[in-house]
Amino acid sequence: MKCKIFWLSAITCNGNIHSFLNYPQIEQFLEDFEFVYNPLFESKANLEAVVSRYHETDILVIEGAISEAFLRGGKSIIDIINMYAPYVKKIVTVGTCATFGGIFRQSPYLDVRGVLFDETQSVDTFARVKDKVVSVSGCPIHPEVLANTLYMIKNEMTFAVDHYHRPKPFFGYTVHNGCTRNEYFEYKVDKHQFGEKEGCMFYDHGCQAPYTHGSCNKILWNEVNSKTRAGQPCMGCTEPDFPKIDLFNTKKNMGIPQYLPLGIAKRTYITLAGVVKAFKIERFEQRITDE
Ligand code: SF4
Ligand code: SF4
């Protein structure tokens, strides 16, 4: 039997649903799931119908930030969520805005936040159903991470989640894990030009992958690529404090990056950096594709 999804758009640019259109197995997905309502895909009902009375739904997907004042289909977004939340199996917050408030925390609405979190702070509006919430953060979401999460729910698989309710199979490690530039990272080589293959972007170019949870370098985008493979730093889009400013620059104090790789103490970093400075490996100074 098909799993029924209601895709509810809150305060959003619709970037996540457009990202989801790139899911490589979308035809199979539509054999396994159906949309009670979705703003882009063929749906069983229209928006006015689904916001005015409950329609049978297995998974409530919420894209976009939440505000008391925001209406969808003429009805308060909070009331719509409250109408569906007690009956659905799971609520999936799709994107960093639905999860933490994201970029829309800067919008004119006063109380913009995510469904369970305002940046890192818990919000109790939906506390009664918080155990049902699974967070798929990202700006935008990785289509395969969302699809695989929905399949895990459909197949009633048990999976661990982190403090922010993100499924650990996809958010249990950092984006640094699997990057093709790890060798440059180890030897502190950041002679990078945007778009080039050489160099790690952590030391000068603001790469946030060593402290950003996600699977972008393990489950490749469009099955072929990731930001860091394409030569652009990770901007930390899955984390509660996204977006930060000055994204392409590594903030430093006394030459030490302000944010260190997860789990690395400052003293350890300084010791390791001192040792690594002794290496000068010639091949790292050369272009990979030079003849
Ligand atoms: S470019 Fe970023 S993800 Fe790649 S090795 Fe450097 S810090 Fe890690
Ligand atoms: S590489 Fe970083 S910024 Fe890009 S999508 Fe992944 S987590 Fe977000």
Image: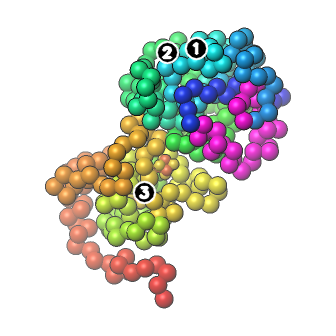
Q: Is residue 38 magenta?
A: yes
Q: Nearer the viewer, residue 269 or 225?
A: 225
Q: Earlier in the sequence, mark 3 or mark 2?
A: 2
Indicate which label's residue lies in the foreground, 3 or 1. 1
Q: Which residues are magenta?
A: 14-40
Whole-percent x, y for residue 223 in the image: 64, 57
Query: Tag 2: residue type?
Result: Glu
Q: Is residue 177 magenta?
A: no
Q: CA distance from mark 3 to mark 2?
A: 35 Å
Which residue bears the numbered disc 2? 68
Indicate which label's residue lies in the foreground, 3 or 2. 2
Whole-percent x, y for residue 170 in the image: 55, 43
Which residue bears the numbered disc 3? 233
Q: Nearer the viewer, residue 49 or 157?
A: 49
**Quadrant position of the N terminus in the picture:** top right
Q: CA distance from mark 1 to mark 2?
A: 7 Å
Q: Residues within 10 Å of mark 2 (few under 14, many from 20)?
A: some
Q: Earlier in the sequence, mark 3 or mark 1?
A: 1
Q: Residues within 10 Å of mark 3 (few under 14, many from 20)?
A: many
